[in-house]
Image (spheres, grey):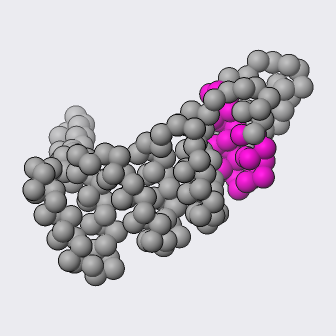
Amino acid sequence: MIGGYGKQGTSSKCLELFNDMVKENVETTDIIFTTVLSACSHTGMITEGWSYFDQMCRVYNFIPSTRHYVCMVDFLDRFGTLEEAWEFIEGMLVQPDCTIHGSFLHGCSIHERFDLGDLVVRKMIELYPDDAGHYMLMANLDAPRGRWDRVSQYRAVMKRRGLRKEVGFARIESSKYQRVALFG
């Protein structure tokens, strides 16, 4: 039910139900905490989100997973506290992965913080140097700002390393037609 309330956008009901569970000493799980943190993120409840994250770690002794960290980075990003989000990422107990960095990068693009966007994509390239998508991210950050020399450099590095962005596709079928769309 907590997950249902969280997905339906009724975060207050989600949190109310969670708090009732705690009062009744019902066992909680890391998945429930993910839902609670996500609910806080989607409703702007930063203070409450930090409180639940702290409770998860200190009271329930859960080691935060990537899902928990993504929720935290997401709500810090949503409210423009990108420096705090980056410090949080740098202090994580686990190695940040592309999901966490991607969440942070999304916040950078929303708030037009290209300086921090550059920083995170460089970190992604450092961690995963053979992923062509990260070089494309850098090129896509630089192109709208007219940094064509840098765009060319990233493409040259990709070519030199033999990296290619994978082409994706979507297929839609009905009784009347079939369509395939390529992207990438």
Q: Position of residue 137 (x, y in %)?
A: 31, 60
From where the camera sits, is residue 109 visible? no
**Residue at image location 35% in from the left, 46% down from the top:** 127
Q: Residue at 63% of width from left, 64% of height from top? A: 81
Residue at 82%, 36% in the rendered image: 16
As drawn, which residue projects farthest toward the bottom?
146
Q: Is 35 situated above or below 159? A: above
Q: Is residue 8 left or right of residue 154?
A: right
Specify the quadrant that holds the N terminus.
top right
Whether 110 is drawn above or below 1: the answer is below
Residue 62 seen by the camera:
yes
Task: Report the residue at 63% width, 60% height from top.
Answer: 84
In x, y percent, where is residue 147?
Answer: 27, 79
Quadrant in the rendering for residue 14: top right
For the stretch drawn in magenta, the main secondary structure is helix
Q: Nearer the viewer, residue 128 or 25?
A: 128
Indicate left or right for 83 with 151 as reference: right
Q: Quadrant of the C terminus?
A: bottom left
For residue 43: magenta? yes
Is 169 on the left or on the right of 113, as rendered? left
Q: Nearer the viewer, residue 110 or 172?
A: 110
Would you say 129 lies left or right of 99 here? left
- In front of the other: 95 or 179: 95
Q: Position of residue 101 (x, y in %)?
A: 45, 51
Counting from the top left corner in percent of width and height, residue 62 is at 67, 27
Question: How many marks do you count on the picture?
Answer: 0
Q: Which residues are magenta?
A: 30-53
